[in-house]
Amino acid sequence: MQHLVMLVYGRSGTGKTEFGSTFPTPILFLDINERGTETIAHKKNIDLLKVTSWDDIEDAFWYLKEGTKYKSIVIDQMTNLQDLGMAEIRKRAKKGESELFTRKEWGNLSGLLKTTIANFRALADDYNMCFIAHERTFDGGEEEDEALEPSVGARVMPSVGSFIDGAVDAIGSTFIRESYTKKAGKKVRSVDYCMRIGPHAFYSTKVRRPVEAGPLPDFVVDPTHEKIVNLITGKIIPSKKKATKKKVTRRK
C-alpha cells in the first residue's frame, strides 16, 4: 500500500507517542513543546526536532519536501501546533496575548492550520505521516461549528478537526484498559494499552480499507503501525486480546 497517513488522539499517558515510534524508521519527530517525546528518546533511528515557533514548522516542511533519509514523520502534537498558530496570527495582527480573537482572526487561524495540514499530507508520496493530538469532548455550539450530539475527537478547533479527519487514512483513539484478577488471594491489576479503531457512536475513528475485508475490531491492543496497515489491507483482523499482567508505566 501507499504510505500511511494517520491521526491518533487520546488522553495523556495512553500511548500516543509510543505508537508514533512504531512507524517505519528512520523517523523524524516534530516535537511541538511536548515533553512526552522523552519516553522514546532512547530509541534508535528516531530524530527529535524541537519546534517552538511557526517558522520552525514552515522550515521543517520545506526541508522534508526537498527529500530526506526519513521514512516517517510524526507531528507531536496538533493541539500545541494550534497554539503556535494562534501566536502567529497574533503576531501578524500585532495583538497582545490578552486581546480576544475576532471572527476574522479565528478564520485566519483555521485557514493557516488547514493549509499546513494539507501541505504535510501532500508529503505522503515520500513519507508515512502520523498526526498526534490530545483528546477533547465536543458538546456542540463551540466556535464556528455546531454538533447535534456530543462527540470525542482531537483537541483542535472543530473546523480543523473535520478537515484533518477527512485528510487521513485512519483515525485511532488511545485508551488504557484495566482488569483485576485474584492470585494467591491477592487482587492483581493488569493494564493494556489500546486503540479504538472500529466504528463508534461518539469517538471519532476511521480505517479506509476494502469492504470485502469484513468488519473492523472495536479496538486493537498494543497498537503498532504494522497492525494498522494489516487492518487497512485486510490481511488480518486481530481478536480482542485478553488482559495480561504488565508492569504499569506511564507513556505519552
Image: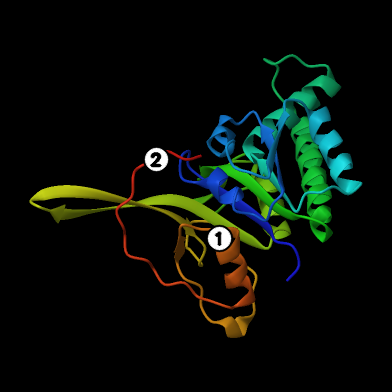
| Mark nearer the N terminus (2 vs 1) | 1
Q: Residue furthest front?
A: 44
- Image position of 212 with respect to 180: above or below: below
Residue sitting at x 92%, y 46%: 66
Query: How many residues crowd around disc 2 within 10 Å: few (fewer than 14), some, or many (20 or more)?
Result: few
> Which dot marks residue 205?
1
In the rendered image, which residue does mark 2 sit on? 249
As helix, strand or loop, the secondary structure at mark 1 comes to: loop
Indicate whether 201 appears above or below 76: below
**Percent position of residue 219, x then y:** 45, 63
Number of residue marks: 2
> What's the residue at 74%, 34% (across, down)?
106
Residue type (three-letter) at the residue carrying disc 2: Thr
Classify 106 as above or below 231.
Answer: above
- For residue 213, the mark is none
User: Which x, y percent locates residue 191?
Assistant: 33, 50
In the rendered view, does 196 fall on the left or right side of 51?
left
Residue 141 visible in rendering: no
Q: Please determine whether, in this image, residue 61 is positioned above or below residue 190.
A: above
Position of residue 79 measured from the top left corner of the image (x, y, whole percent): 63, 37
**Quick one: label 1, few (<14), some, or many (20+) residues within 10 Å?**
many
Q: Residue furthest right?
A: 66
Measured Cα–Cα span from mark 2 to mark 1: 26 Å
Rendered location of residue 240, percent (x, y): 39, 68
**Label 2: element kind:** loop
Hey, which residue is sitting farthest bottom in the picture?
212
Residue nearest the observer in this picture, 191 or 163: 191
The colour scheme of the drawn protein is: rainbow
- Residue type highlighted by circle 1: Thr
- Residue at image coords 64%, 39%: 77
Q: Is residue 39 left or right of residue 80?
A: left
